[in-house]
Image (tube, helix red, strand yellow):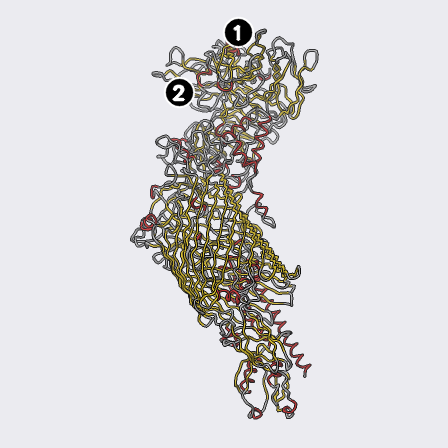
């Protein structure tokens, strides 16, 4: 009996266990059903306009004629937009153009365009048609292109406006894309595609001549790039990297202007391509400054560039009514810089020069290493740049007998430009000051009221600069100030200059406006922290910008006016000693750009 | 996922089935019989047994003919036990075989039958008033045989024939042991109050006062002089509540919003104060005055009590209630329990995705959040460069000239790029939810008779929830697009289909919502009680709690009916992490001064606590983009002026203005940005009470007096960093900063990155621009975008000090009538000071006015509000009818103080409320007069039936006021309201009714043994007159809009119901709870649309525990089983969520059901 009861209980427990099992199964089933993994995908958008990569070919169109529209194999790749769809649109909108797949920023042909591979087929030649203006009824030209698998080729699209005289519309030019043999150099060549044309208002000076590529002072760059005939181009030549104001000269040393889009600076006089200023004697008339526009540019190590001369529409100042000029268009041959191969980011090189800011010392030279050394520099002069590798370098200044008179360890940074100033200190000992120069002539604008969340809007470049920096390397005074001929200091960069200290807060003075074409003097004043400009030191002769012109014959040979100042990035320094016993002080300058 | 969809539909069925099965299982196994028959025939009894057991009985009915009617009273007995006892002294024998019981006469019975057991009858009464006590537990010492006294205090119990000792226990009364035997078969037991004994002048400090069961909290409630409600640890466990707010939701009269904000009887905010073990809890929310209840883990609590009326010994600044959290008490014997649970939310599933963002890992302890704090280097920048960012831009530009400047520029660049380069949310695999807790407690005897008690507790949980494909629709009477950008604009207009005669709303913006939240929280509890003797006891408690939250929200949508040729999209990303801490230390002591029952006793409580709230790098971005059908122009600032360029799409970070504020009547408001906010509060709370008993009217009466000192010191710091592309940042020399127009070129970075928000804050835009191959020789570096380095103008510090003292009498006028009341004096001293140095100021605040004066806001940085001692009265009357029924009436006056934040003269654009939150230094205290009535009946232990009515009259009511000065149809920018607190000149009224029922179903229907049902309900009505501005806005279209509005977030009703089944034998405990809260006003609209109301959401939860062995218990819960749509609608109040017959849903989403399963290990 008892056993049976026991069995009964056991059965009950087993039953319970089974049910409990069922309960658990149900519970787990419930969990399982709800536990389905949920993907919960993100809501994503990608607003990039073009996400597919366009594969480039080796063929490039170089639009030095500033044509506007393009067809390839009969397909219009630019927008041909004129007049605008909405006639009530504001002016800007009516002159603007719509982006297209191949011309995403403007929808119109720019300076260069690499033809995508997709347009080349083995069966058919690729046909290019370009239009000078916005519509199909404007001047246009059609030509076939082909891709040579080994040779990069440029097709220079020339100006085909009605004003142009008979001549080629397109010139096929081989392009070099092999890096310079010396990695700290760049390659450059000159193409002379000068042409003749009509101007309606005035007759422009005739610049149809063989062309020569020259540095700012008129020195030819190389025999290769000298006297390149019309319709021809030179070989590439290798030039050490740096900041240059290249000029293009005709055979008779006349300067050819540079084509630019900058609306403010680029103005020529009627007959010759000079820049103009208001005639001091007759406010209504423009007067020549003797200057021809040519921008400064840093040519990076490893880059390949072409400079091409071709007619270009620019602005011209005609005498106007009252006090105003009239600005109209004029066509003139001008040069443009075309990048054939973009330089890689310069992470390796830096340029250093020596400035001998002493009076009456023996010539000095700067040695970075056995191979990298400057020429010997006499007093008050400065050396050419040497190119150095970046990093920590020992700068040694040696006298003619090879003694190290100055040695300074410096951390040289890529892409920078340094001048090592050697000057005479308090006890007639040689001292040095390493100054970092800004050859891009950029200025930081704004003031403390500016909201500085963004920095970019405050940087301004002056591509045709008259830029000066000031140094006080003179012993005898606590501080000096440099002024113009009227005793007005050149702003903060020239005021309260402490001996042997280079200012580092916006240290450049940018001569802008009409002043830049006038002669300026640099006068020395003894100032004090409470006195500005202070006392004029009449014993020290002022320095005139006219005296800083490298070679006046560049102008006189071509029968032109000598300008009052040449553009460039300069440092003006007071050097020497000035005290009761010794009054031997001078103002010297360095022109950093070539 | 079809499978899942079907299964979701089946889920409810499944849970119900599970309930049924568990019930059936328990019954089958137990085969237990519970019988209580008086004067019945044997046949009736056997029939009843048959019904309960399914055993059939075989007998000849004639054999029972001459037997007298019998009495039987058994509970939970097995068949064998029942039959054995039943036939003990009767001449029958029985045989159980299979499912059959055969009964026959036993001829020898009369001779051999000797009474094997002795029946003891008795009566239990309360010694103080001789009233019968029901529910007293009576146990035979050394056995498990237990019975309890019935409603008349009577009981029967069978004891072995020899003597036995009966143990009588009842909560709050002293346990008694009575020896019974054959000569002592009818007894009367008089039970005494545990503390009223002369020889036992015992005190019990809070730390030892154990009230963690429903029976216990109801008992406390029954005896209290005031109206109070409570939830015990037992119920907290049964409802599966993890946080304190979840538990509070179950208490009658309490509503909870967003799992954070607690309202009692419809009044929230400052009307409710929180106390932990009797000391004030710090508010750690920078925006609202809330108690950080969600920080306190519910598993570390014994109970939560809500005092709805007060006596003068309680703070007077709880206009609607005091939420008192009582941490775990120290047990008398060793306990050790460990719980580990794990689960998931059905919106995520196991291993599913939830919305989060890159580098959102909080770390196991949440401390990784603080790694995103603003670095000291960044904070120092504001000091180092007091002239602002331009001086840094200049430094960067000059950095090429000297190596020292270069180094500094690089350092700043590093600081600017140190922030996470991410502004968008991103789905991630969610971790499983985890809950762990452990408690240990014991008491030890030391130094002879001294006693020391220890409790240690720890808790940790981590859970993730996700909302996917939620719908968010902004309805409006307006159409058009206002983005803050001139490129994305179409005139605001009221479409012709909306008129005052034809009411309707149009879709303005529609969004899909994806919001993921991950919470982690952990707490530590330590308690130590030291008892010198029965009269002196001190205790110390520590509670530390830490919490981290990550919330990632993505709204993807568009503007509808823009009137623009093309699509206008709007995308919002909000990335927020918060780290909060709360630590309290308190020392309490209770001392009975002399060794007699009329001895005065002193109790005191000294506490300090600190709380902090840290929101590092809270990122918010609302990108509006517009793709016109054809490309249009965008003007970009270049070196030579502005140049137009064609774009296919325009971008803007939506921002606008707040009109009617600030010295110029307009302020920029940019919700986009990275924000750092940090709030720290230290609280010192000291109080002491002295109670002096005396005799009057033949009863023991009590006079009580004491004081309370509270001081809160707060510091608040904030940095707001604007984003690149913000409409209000100058991005050009020609930008006119400080005009009412946004700068023209500021959105350029958005175009640069094609609207990619992550690229926007990447090194591409932020920090020093890298050198390129086109950089000229020796050219200086230029800074790209730099974050503003100065702190925002909202930093303040202040204190909130109150002093109080009181005197009160607790009188028993007669045995049945008790009066407790007196007066309390409270003083207020609130002061704050806004930091006005070195700030980032909105340019619109810096412009000179027409007279050329430069006006700064705040004009008055210091706020001071002092009020001297003011009396607050309270009287509570209780009439007790036969000890089980109370009639209560109470009257009291209370106050509510402005919060520190509200009185401080700061203004801050709050991206959550989308408005400018403004301080008001002119605020004064609110005075409230309260009336309460309650009838409550405690039929049995653990049971209650109660009806309450209450009314409140509020003078100088502190109300949140929205004001919007809109330009209406002429608006060209988004407009945001000003949100401020004001003293309402109108008297506000709140009144309502509470109903409560908790019943042991077993007492009314025997078959329902073990089932408990509970329900409570709040019906409340509140009204406040709308401000003229609000009314005007409503009437602009809806001429019938009501003039009154319910109070913010106040629900007209809230209902809780639960059904609990407990089977002690099998160790099963099942609870189903249901909660629904009526519609609540959640947003006030001032542009003509009706206000937003949240719709009632029925929440059904199921919680179970099943004992697996003596030490091991399986537990789990399923929450929000119904998983209904949670909706917010545009409506007028009490219209069923409709506006003129149509439903306009603002937001609809599903929260997902939550499942958790785990084990609990109990060592003792």
- Residue B715 shows in this picture: yes
Crowding at mark 1 (Cα within 10 Å: few <14, some 14-19, many 20+): few
Say which of A504 and B568 sits in front: A504
Say which of B683 and A139 sits in front: B683
Judge from the rendering whether residue B101 lies leftward or rightward of residue B324; answer left or right: right
Q: Secondary structure at mark 2?
A: strand
Crowding at mark 2 (Cα within 10 Å: few <14, some 14-19, many 20+): some
Specify the subunit that label 1 lies on: A
User: Which of marks 2 and 1 precedes in the sequence?
Assistant: 2
The residue carrying mark 2 is A328
Quadrant in the picture for the N terminus of chain B: bottom right
Give residue B1136's position: percent from left, percent from top.
38, 60
- Residue B438 shows in this picture: no
> Which image quarter: residue B1110?
bottom right
Judge from the rendering whether residue B649 lies leftward or rightward of residue A340; answer left or right: left
> Which image quarter: residue A357?
top right
Q: Which numbered mark, 1 or 2, is in the foreground of this view?
A: 1
Give residue B769's position: percent from left, percent from top.
54, 32
Q: Which mark is residue A51?
A: none
The vertical placement of B42 against B885, above or below, is: below
Q: Give the number of marks.
A: 2
Specify the subunit that label 2 lies on: A
The vertical placement of B269 against B95, above or below, is: above
- Extreme-left residue of the structure: B501
Say which of B557 and B986 sits in front: B986
The residue carrying mark 1 is A539
Q: Secondary structure at mark 1?
A: loop
């Amino acid at each position: 009996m008892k056993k049976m009861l026991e069995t009964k209980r056991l059965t009950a427990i087993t039953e319970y266990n089974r049910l409990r099992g069922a309960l658990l199964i149900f519970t787990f089933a419930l969990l399982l059903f709800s536990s389905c993994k949920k993907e919960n995908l993100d809501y994503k958008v990608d607003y990039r306009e073009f996400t597919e990569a366009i594969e480039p070919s080796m063929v490039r169109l170089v639009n030095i004629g500033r044509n506007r529209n393009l067809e390839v194999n009969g397909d219009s790749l630019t927008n041909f937009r004129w007049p605008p769809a909405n006639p009530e649109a504001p002016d800007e909108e009516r002159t603007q153009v719509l982006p297209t797949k191949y011309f995403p920023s403007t929808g119109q042909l720019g300076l260069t365009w690499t033809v995508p591979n997709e347009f080349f087929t083995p069966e058919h030649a690729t046909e290019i048609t370009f239009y000078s203006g916005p519509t199909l009824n404007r001047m246009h030209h059609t030509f076939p292109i082909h891709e040579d698998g080994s040779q990069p080729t440029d097709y220079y699209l020339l100006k085909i406006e009605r004003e142009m005289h008979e001549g080629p519309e397109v010139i096929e030019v081989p392009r070099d894309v092999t890096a310079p043999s010396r990695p700290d150099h760049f390659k450059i060549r000159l193409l002379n595609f000068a042409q003749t044309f009509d101007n309606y208002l005035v007759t422009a000076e005739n610049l149809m001549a063989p062309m020569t590529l020259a540095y700012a002072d008129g020195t030819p760059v190389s025999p290769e790039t000298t006297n390149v005939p019309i319709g021809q181009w030179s070989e590439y030549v290798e030039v050490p990297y740096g900041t240059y104001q290249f000029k293009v000269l005709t055979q008779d040393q006349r300067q050819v202007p540079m084509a630019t889009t900058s609306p403010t600076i680029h103005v020529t006089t009627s007959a010759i391509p000079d820049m103009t200023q208001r005639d001091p004697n007759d406010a209504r008339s423009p007067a020549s400054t003797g200057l021809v526009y040519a921008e400064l540019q840093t040519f990076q190590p490893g880059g390949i560039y072409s400079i091409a001369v071709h007619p270009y529409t620019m602005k011209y100042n005609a005498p106007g009514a009252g006090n105003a000029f009239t600005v109209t268009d004029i066509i003139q041959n001008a040069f443009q810089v075309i990048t054939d191969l973009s330089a890689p980011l310069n992470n390796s090189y830096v340029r250093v020069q020596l400035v001998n800011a002493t009076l009456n010392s023996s010539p000095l030279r700067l040695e970075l290493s056995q191979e990298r050394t400057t020429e010997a520099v006499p007093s008050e002069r400065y050396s050419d740049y040497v190119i150095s590798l970046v990093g920590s370098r020992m700068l040694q200044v040696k006298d003619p007998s090879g003694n190290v008179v100055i040695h300074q360890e410096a951390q040289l940074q890529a892409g920078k430009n340094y001048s090592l100033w050697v000057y005479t200190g308090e006890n007639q000992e040689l001292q040095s000051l390493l100054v970092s120069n800004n050859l891009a002539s950029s200025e930081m604008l704004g003031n403390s009221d500016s909201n500085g969340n963004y920095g970019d809007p405050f940087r301004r470049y002056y591509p045709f600069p008259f830029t000066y920096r000031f140094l006080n390397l003179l012993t005898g005074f606590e501080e000096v100030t440099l002024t113009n001929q009227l005793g007005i200091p050149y702003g903060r960069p020239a005021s309260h200059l402490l001996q042997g200290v280079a200012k580092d807060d916006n240290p450049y003075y940018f001569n802008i406006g009409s002043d830049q074409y006038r002669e300026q003097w640099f006068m020395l004043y003894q100032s004090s922290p409470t006195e500005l400009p202070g006392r004029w030191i009449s014993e020290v002769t002022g320095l005139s910008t006219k005296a800083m012109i490298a070679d006046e014959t560049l102008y006189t040979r071509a029968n032109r006016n000598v300008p009052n100042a040449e553009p460039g990035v300069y440092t003006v320094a007071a050097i020497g000693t000035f005290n009761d016993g010794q009054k031997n002080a001078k103002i010297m300058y360095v022109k950093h750009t070539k | 996922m079809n499978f899942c969809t079907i299964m979701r539909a089946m889920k409810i069925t499944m849970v119900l089935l599970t309930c049924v099965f568990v019930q059936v299982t328990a019954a089958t196994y137990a085969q237990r019989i519970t019988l209580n028959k008086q004067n019945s025939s044997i046949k009736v009894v056997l029939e009843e047994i048959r019904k309960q057991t399914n055993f059939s009985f075989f007998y000849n009915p004639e054999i029972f003919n001459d037997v007298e009617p019998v009495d039987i009273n058994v509970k939970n007995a097995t068949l064998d036990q029942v039959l054995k006892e039943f036939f003990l002294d009767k001449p029958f024998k029985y045989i159980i075989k299979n499912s059959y019981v055969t009964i026959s006469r036993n001829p020898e019975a009369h001779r051999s039958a000797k009474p094997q057991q002795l029946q003891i009858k008795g009566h239990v009464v309360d010694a103080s008033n001789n009233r019968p006590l029901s529910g007293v537990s009576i146990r035979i010492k050394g056995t498990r045989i237990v019975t309890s006294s019935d409603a008349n205090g009577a009981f029967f119990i069978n004891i072995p024939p020899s003597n036995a000792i009966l143990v009588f226990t009842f909560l709050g009364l002293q346990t008694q042991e009575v020896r019974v035997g054959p000569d002592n078969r009818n007894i009367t037991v008089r039970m005494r109050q545990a503390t009223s004994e002369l020889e036992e002048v015992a005190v019990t400090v809070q730390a030892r006062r154990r009230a963690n069961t429903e029976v216990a909290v109801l008992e406390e409630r029954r005896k209290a002089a005031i109206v109070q409600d409570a939830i015990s640890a037992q119920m907290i466990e049964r409802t599966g509540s993890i946080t304190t707010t979840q538990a509070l939701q179950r208490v009658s009269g309490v509503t909870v919003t967003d799992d954070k904000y607690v309202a009692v009887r419809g009044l929230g905010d400052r009307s409710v104060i929180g106390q932990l073990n009797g000391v004030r809890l710090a508010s750690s929310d920078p925006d609202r005055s809330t108690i950080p209840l969600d920080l306190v883990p519910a598993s570390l609590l014994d109970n939560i009590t809500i005092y709805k009326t007060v006596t003068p010994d309680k703070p007077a600044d709880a206009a609607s209630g005091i939420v008192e959290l009582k941490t775990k008490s120290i047990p008398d014997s060793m306990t050790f329990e460990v719980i580990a649970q794990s689960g998931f939310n059905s919106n995520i599933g196991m291993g599913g995705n939830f919305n989060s963002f890159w580098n959102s890992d909080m770390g196991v302890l949440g401390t990784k959040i603080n790694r995103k704090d603003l670095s000291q280097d960044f904070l120092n920048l504001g000091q180092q460069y007091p002239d602002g960012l331009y001086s840094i831009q200049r430094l960067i530009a000059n950095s090429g000239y000297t190596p020292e400047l270069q180094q500094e520029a690089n350092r700043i660049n590093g600081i600017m790029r140190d922030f996470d380069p991410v502004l968008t949310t991103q789905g991630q695999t969610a971790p499983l939810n985890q809950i762990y807790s452990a408690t240990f407690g014991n008491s030890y005897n030391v130094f002879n008779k001294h006693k020391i008690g220890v409790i240690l507790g720890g808790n940790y949980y981590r859970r993730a929830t996700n909302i996917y494909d939620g719908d968010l629709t902004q309805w409006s009477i307006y159409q058009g697009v206002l983005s803050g950008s001139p490129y994305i604009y179409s005139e605001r207009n009221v479409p012709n289909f909306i008129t005052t005669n034809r009411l309707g709303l149009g879709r303005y913006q529609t969004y899909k919502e994806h919001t993921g939240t991950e919470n982690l929280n952990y707490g530590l509890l330590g308690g130590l009680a030291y008892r010198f003797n029965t009269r002196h006891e001190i205790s110390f408690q520590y509670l530390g709690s830490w919490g981290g939250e990550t919330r990632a929200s993505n709204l993807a949508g568009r503007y509808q009916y823009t009137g623009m040729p093309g699509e206008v999209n709007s995308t919002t990303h909000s990335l927020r992490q918060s780290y909060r801490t709360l630590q309290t230390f308190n020392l309490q002591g209770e001392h009975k001064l002399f060794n007699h029952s009329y001895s005065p006793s002193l109790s005191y409580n000294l506490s300090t606590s600190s709380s902090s709230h840290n929101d590092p790098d809270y990122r918010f971005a609302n990108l509006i983009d517009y793709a016109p059908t054809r490309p249009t122009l965008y003007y970009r600032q270049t070196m030579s002026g502005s140049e137009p360029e064609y774009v296919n799409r325009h971008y803007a970070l939506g921002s606008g203005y707040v009109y009617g504020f600030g010295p110029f009547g307009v302020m920029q408001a940019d919700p986009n940005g990275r924000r750092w906010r940090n709030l720290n509060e230290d609280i010192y709370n000291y109080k002491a009470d002295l109670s002096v008993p005396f005799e009057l009217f033949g009863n023991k009466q009590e006079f009580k007096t004491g004081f309370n000192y509270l001081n809160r010191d707060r510091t608040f710091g904030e940095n707001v960093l604007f984003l690149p592309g913000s409409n209000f940042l100058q991005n050009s020399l020609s930008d006119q900063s400080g005009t009412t127009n946004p700068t023209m070129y500021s959105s350029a970075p958005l175009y640069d990155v094609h609207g990619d928000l992550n690229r926007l804050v990447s090194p591409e835009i932020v920090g020093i621009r890298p050198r390129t191959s086109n950089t000229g020789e020796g050219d200086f570096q230029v800074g790209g975008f730099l974050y503003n380095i100065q702190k925002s103008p909202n930093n303040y510090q202040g204190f909130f000090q109150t002093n109080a003292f009181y005197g009160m009498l607790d009188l028993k006028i007669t045995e049945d009538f008790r009066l407790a009341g007196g007066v309390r004096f409270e003083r207020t001293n609130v002061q704050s000071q806004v930091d006005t140095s070195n700030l980032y100021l909105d340019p619109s605040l810096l412009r000179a006015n027409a007279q050329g004066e430069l006006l700064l806001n705040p004009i008055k940085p210091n706020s001071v509000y002092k009020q001297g001692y003011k009396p607050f009265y309270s009287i509570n009357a209780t009439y007790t009818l036969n000890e089980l029924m109370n009639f209560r009436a109470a009257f009291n006056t209370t106050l509510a103080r402005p919060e520190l934040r509200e009185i401080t003269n700061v203004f801050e654009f709050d991206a959550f409320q989308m408005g400018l939150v403004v301080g008001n230094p002119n605020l004064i205290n609110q005075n409230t007069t309260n009336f309460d009535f309650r009838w409550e009946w405690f039929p049995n232990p653990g049971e209650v039936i109660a009806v309450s009515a209450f009314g409140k009259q509020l003078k100088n009511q502190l109300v949140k006021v929205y004001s919007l000065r809109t330009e209406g149809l002429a608006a060209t920018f988004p407009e945001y309201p000003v949100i401020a607190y004001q003293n309402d000149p109108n008297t506000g009224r709140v009144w309502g009714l509470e109903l409560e029922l908790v019943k042991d179903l077993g007492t009314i229907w025997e078959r329902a043994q073990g089932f408990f049902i509970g329900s409570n309900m709040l019906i409340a009505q509140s009204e406040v007159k709308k401000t003229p501005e609000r009314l005007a806005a409503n009437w602009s279209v809806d001429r019938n809009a009501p003039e009154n509005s319910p109070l913010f977030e106040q629900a007209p009703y809230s209902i809780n119901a639960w059904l609990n089944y407990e089977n002690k034998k099998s160790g099963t405990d099942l609870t189903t709870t249901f909660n629904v809260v009526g519609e609540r006003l959640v947003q006030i609209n001032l542009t003509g649309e009706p206000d937003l109301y949240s719709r009632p959401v029925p929440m059904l939860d199921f919680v179970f525990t099943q004992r697996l062995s003596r030490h091991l218990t399986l537990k789990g819960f399923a929450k929000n089983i119904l998983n209904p749509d949670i909706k917010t609608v545009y409506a007028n109040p009490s219209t069923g969520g409709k506006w003129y017959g149509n439903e306009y849903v603002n937001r609809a989403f599903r929260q997902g059901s939550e499942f958790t399963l785990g084990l609990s290990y109990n060592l003792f």
